[in-house]
Amino acid sequence: MKLILASQSPRRRELLGQLGVSFECCPADIDETPLNNEFPDAYVIRMAMEKAQVVAAVNPSSWVLGSDTSVIVDGQILGKPESKEHGTDMLLSLSNRTHEVLTAVALVAVDESNQHSRHCLVKTQVSFREISQQMAEAYWHTQEPADKAGAYGIQGLGGMLVRSITGSYSSVVGLPLAETADLLMDIGIKGWWSWPQE
């Protein structure tokens, strides 16, 4: 069975490519609004599953990988910023403190009568330096935060905002590599670890 990545994120494409698996991309268009009183863990798992399910429904007999990453502070889900003010407010809310980044990965396949699925959830603690209003606005003007959960990208210019992390770096970027490799091994999809050796 072929593998499809249900994302248009260049970061997720690059990370999945690092595993040496063959895959196609087919972005999923879903409503990403949290449900009333939905816990962050449940939200990111639901998002990853729904992305995979939407694409799997039109690609039978393929495994579809969906993933979702959210930044959590004070129990609140920080999605992608809607404006400069929203983005800078997010950054200032993360200033000089530790927040949690949740990434869920889901694999879904649909055949004639069944849906097959599995998923994992990875939690990482990220500690930020103190961020001034000027620094938050300067970072916003780089345009990097505009399409990122929590209004920062750890793999880019936003890396200088991070004092330390406890957990998976690749999960904060958007796809936890060790856990994703485990899921792919479980369904028999082979990556660089199974390449022939001379």
Image: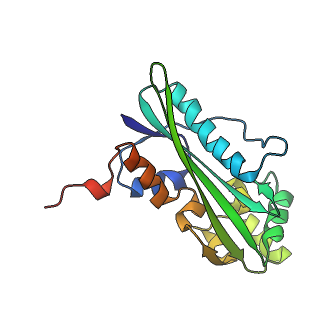
Residue 32 at what x, y percent from top left?
Answer: 72, 41
| Rendered location of residue 74, percent (x, y) | 83, 64
Colouring mode (rainbow / by chain / secondary structure / one colour): rainbow
| Whole-percent x, y for residue 49 in the image | 60, 39
Question: Does residue 150 appear left or right of residue 175 in this picture?
Answer: right
Image quadrant holding the C terminus, namely: bottom left
Most foreground residue, 188 or 61: 188
> 41 left or right of 196?
right
Can you name the residue that lies furthest to the top here?
112
Identify the residue at the far left of this view: 198
Residue 155 in view in this figure: yes
If the image is split into quadrants, where does the N terminus sit?
top left
45 is higher (above) or lower (below) than 50: below
State the residue at coordinates (70%, 65%): 100
x 45%, y 60%: residue: 178
- 1 lies left or right of 195: right
Q: Is residue 125 above or below residue 21?
A: below
Q: Is residue 2 above or below residue 180?
A: above
Q: How many marks?
A: 0
* Viewer-nearest residue: 166 or 58: 166
Residue at 62% x, 36% y: name it.
Answer: 50
Residue 79 seen in the current view: no
- Residue 103, by quadrant, is bottom right
Q: Position of residue 172 (x, y in %)?
A: 60, 63
Which residue is at 51% across, 42% downward?
118
